[in-house]
Image (spheres, helix red, strand yellow):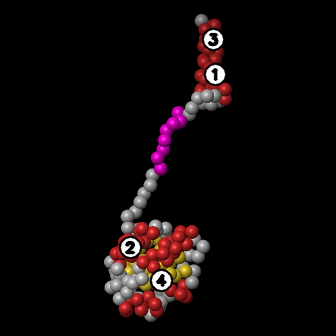
Amino acid sequence: MQRMRKAVPVVLVAMLLLVSLSLAVGCGGDETATEGTQPPDAGVVVEPTTTTIAGAPKAFKHLIGTTLAVTDESPEKVRASIERRTPMVIAFYVTGGTDDAVVLKHLDDLAVRFAEIDFYKFDYKLPGEYGDLSALLEIDYPPQVTFVDDRGVIQAVTSGYADEGTLNQNLTNIR
């Protein structure tokens, strides 16, 4: 009986060592033991999630349908367009931005087809050129383009990159 009492701890220690060793090998402890096998998630394809926002970003939804209330601090040419009841596009950009350059190029190309619309571009870094217009239009993330109809009502706002088709549609809508 005494022999058995001494053997039990030895057997338990030996079993613990065997279990520990087998777990270490099973978890990658022995490089040759797992060679040629694939991890459990091999072959699983993860699809990226894409979110799209139709129309103006939520931050500008409250501007849509409001009248652009220019002041004496607003650029004269914008005030003149409102007085003449001429639809206009007001683009704010940052020089050197890739998205900014592409959006401005699209607007230049479209201006040829939409001659009856006034196109205004303002470099965000030159506030002396646009006065209070950035505050009135809540410029947040250039390039930001605001589409104003002939009644002075804001019909659409894009912020960040906008493709030519989107810009074209917004221009068509303010004719």
Q: Which residue carries the number 4 mark? A: 120
Residue 114 is situated, as x and y percent measured from the top left of the image, at 41, 79
Q: In the picture shown, does residue 56 fall above or below 136? A: above
**Distance between mark 3 and mark 4 Cα atoms:** 92 Å
**Residue type, mark 4 in image:** Tyr
Which of pointers 1 and 2 indicates the residue nearer the eye?
A: 2
Q: Earlier in the sequence, mark 2 or mark 3?
A: 3
Q: Which residue carries the number 2 mark? A: 170
> What secondary structure is found at the residue carrying circle 1?
helix
> What secondary structure is found at the residue carrying circle 2?
helix
Q: Earlier in the sequence, mark 3 or mark 1?
A: 3
Q: Residues within 10 Å of mark 4 (few under 14, many from 20)?
A: some
Q: Which residue carries the number 1 mark? A: 17
Q: Which residue carries the number 3 mark? A: 7
Q: In the picture shown, does residue 130 fall above or below 36? A: below
The part of the chain drawn in magenta is: 40-48
**Distance between mark 4 and mark 1 Cα atoms:** 78 Å
Which of pointers 4 and 1 indicates the residue nearer the eye?
A: 4
Q: Residue at x 45, y 75 (%)?
A: 110
The C terminus lies in quadrant: bottom left
Q: In the picture shown, does residue 96 fall above or below 120? A: above
Q: Earlier in the sequence, mark 1 or mark 2?
A: 1
